[in-house]
Amino acid sequence: MEGGKEATDCGACDTAGGGCGDGCESEANGLVALLVGVGVVWVLVFLIRPKARKRLVVGFLICIVLGGGYVIAFAHSSGTLGEPARGILSVFSPSTSDTRDASSNLYRVFEDNDLKYTVKQYPLGLGFGKPFLQPEPLTSIFPGILAVDPYYNYVPHNTIYWVWVDLGPLGYLALWLLIGSIIVRGCVIVRQLRDGYLQVVAIYVVAVTFMEVVVAFADYQLFFYRNVIYLGLLCGMLVKLPALDAEGQAIDTRVTYPERAPARGFALHHTSPAPTDTKVASTSQHSVGEIAQRVPGDSVSGSEGSYSYSSFAAAQDDNRRGGVTTGPQYRPAKGGTYR
């Protein structure tokens, strides 16, 4: 997130005496968002890779066991190694003995209540540039916050509620419509794509969208324009992926199925004149070994007429299919039926 606002919040917490632990809270929210993102990736890969589901389930169970053991083992550790465990635990079970975490949680509870109260008083939206109402003053928790963060009552931590307060129900609905569209469209695109790399990109965009929402509920995420611009760029990439995938598939098709060129070996095609009755072309006069040594354009005379040499593989198809080749660039040999 942006450094200025975060530093201001931490400074405000320290000035208030006792601190609010905003930096620790942000770290905890980031870890939760990361877990949500990993979960989204796991689900999408599980859906699009049926053959990998067994390994995914086994890996998931292993991560649950190891992750749970780590949190239990280091939840009360004071060292650096235990910081992630303490952060995750503080989200679900805030410690009453940690005054910083307790103050931070209390501040956010007050702030959310103030936002809900403001929505009730201004059901159509308060509008930008106006401070939200504070029936429970935040300065009662941090008396010195105004000196450190002059716009604390304009931009709350919960920027999802912030949109609701400022734009009203229509803006709030538009926000969720946008987020839902990105997620739904992203999931559909993930299922449609055939290129593995592009699928990874689409999965990443969907996961980041979920993470954006999680952090936006707690830490100014929609207020920081760099985050929003980044998400917008990802959405632009997302809608372009199907076209890129189609182009890649077209290139792969041309490479995999090129126009059939004459093979190294060549076989006999009857060209003239047409026989009066259906006869089976005999290879007794021209063995396969002799045929393989011919080059395109060579011809040989036979009792049934003259013959020219073309792709041996195509002639094999002719012989098997009665003169009908498998490639559109070949024509049935004129003047005879080959089986």
Image: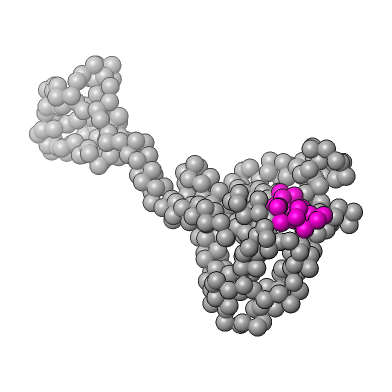
| Bounds of the magenta segment | 10-28
Q: Is residue 57 magenta?
A: no
In-front residue for pair 149/22: 149
Any part of residue 241 in sight: yes
From what the image shows, is residue 317 above or below residue 231? above
What residue is at 20 percent from the left and 19 percent from the top?
294
Report which quarter residue 153 is drawn in: bottom right
Residue at horizontal 50%, vertical 42%?
196
Residue 13 x %, y %? 74, 56
In depth, the one of 137 and 169 nearer the eye is 137
Image quadrant of residue 116? bottom right
Q: Is residue 284 left or right of residue 156?
A: left
User: Is 127 positioned to the left or the right of 152 in the image?
Assistant: left
Q: Residue 291 in the image: state x and y as whole percent.
A: 24, 20
**Which residue is pictured at 30% across the width and 36% down the height?**
258
- The answer to whether 306 is drawn above or below residue 324 in the figure is above
